[in-house]
Amino acid sequence: MTTESEALDAYSKVVSTVAAKVLPSVASLSVRTARGEGAGSGVAFTDDGFMLTSAHVVAGAVGGVAEFTDGNESRFDVVGTDPLADLAVLRVRDGSAPTAALGDADTLRIGQLVVAVGNPLGLAGSVTAGVVSALGRSLPVRDGRRTRLIDDVIQTDAALNPGNSGGALADSIGKVVGINTAVAGIGLGLAVPINSTTRTIISELMTTGKVRRAFLGVAGAPAPLPPQLATRLSQRRGLRLMEVVPGSPAAKAGLFLGDVIVSAGGKKVQGVQDIQRLMLGPAIGQRLSITVLRRGAFVDVVAIPAPLD
């Protein structure tokens, strides 16, 4: 039987092992913009100098200075930012740091151990540990007049402070599963997940410096499905359409107010985030199959998302 001291020792070993693996890849960032000086953290993830951080850390900046825990400094350039995902890609000019391995946040479970690595309050190379306290949170972010929800945000009780933004949230084997983005309250922190959706965003930022998004032209709210249907589909809710923009791809496809979207692109739709997740650049101009519940019957339509201006 494992004693309490043995369990604590095992916990400490996991945290220290993760810290040793991830710390060399995390840099303290200093930026200067028209609004003044700023700071945050960044995570090296490729051998040729690309780094990840939060978009709000480098907002308004074209570059800055990255300092790693071994004392090496390098100027970096901002390659691209996506405020609507609060992610940015940077590239250091001189050499590269040891790279962190990116994981998959979609495999996380509530209660799982995570380790936050960053530079809070100017304290370089700080490590805190905690657990995943919630999954599926939504974080509203604004880009000009547009507001979008970053879906599936990771909530953790690992202590985060100003300066942690852009740093790594790692799992127990040292893979980066999130980029720390916000302090939600005392004892609560939020991180943008690393998953298939954000990997697509990161790839577009690396290659083009921006993220193209698709436009479907609907707005809606979650709606419960009839009990028998919910059991058959293993899905409790769909997305009831409260608005269909005239002339939009949705309208041209034959979607109407009151329709309840239950799937799109072969994936379940239970809320607006499920639609947003599909509306990235690769969806533009491509056929998107949509199944809706209309007057008690299933109706299949095909929409072709347009570029979002």
Image (cartoon, rainbow, N blue to C red):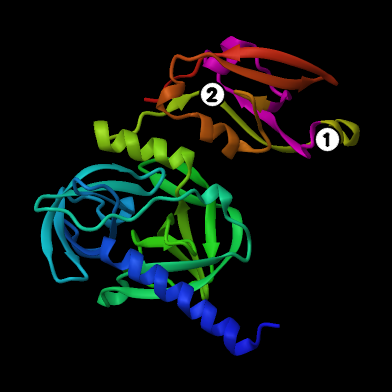
Q: Which of the pair 301/240 is nearer the observer?
A: 301
Type of amino acid at the residue the image marks with label 1? Ala
In the image, residue 204 sits, relative to residue 90, either above or below, namely above
Residue that carries the numbered disc 2 in the rendered image: 217
Q: Residue at x 20, y 66 (%)?
A: 68
Q: Earlier in the sequence, mark 1 or mark 2?
A: 2
Q: Position of residue 137 (x, y in %)?
A: 58, 54
Type of amino acid at the residue the image marks with label 2? Gly
Callout 2: SS: loop
Q: Is residue 28 left or right of residue 237?
A: left
In the image, residue 29 sits, relative to residue 303, either above or below, namely below
**Magenta stretch holds residue 205:** no
**Magenta stretch holds residue 243:** yes
Q: Is residue 68 left or right of residue 103?
A: left
- Does any portion of residue 28 appear in the rendered image? yes
Q: Which of the pair 170/62 is nearer the observer?
A: 170
Rounded to the nearest angstrom, the CA distance separating label 1 from label 2 is 26 Å
Q: Quadrant of residue 111?
A: bottom right
Q: Residue at x 66, y 83 (%)?
A: 2
Most extreme residue toward the right is: 228
Callout 1: SS: helix
Residue that carries the numbered disc 1 in the rendered image: 230
Between label 1 and label 2, give the one nearer the viewer. Answer: 1
Q: Is residue 23 left or right of residue 4?
A: left
Q: Which mark, residue 114?
A: none
Q: Position of residue 62 (x, y in %)?
A: 15, 48
Give the magenta range.
Answer: 233-262
Q: Which of the pair 227/111 is nearer the observer?
A: 111
Q: Which of the pair 30/32 is nearer the observer?
A: 30
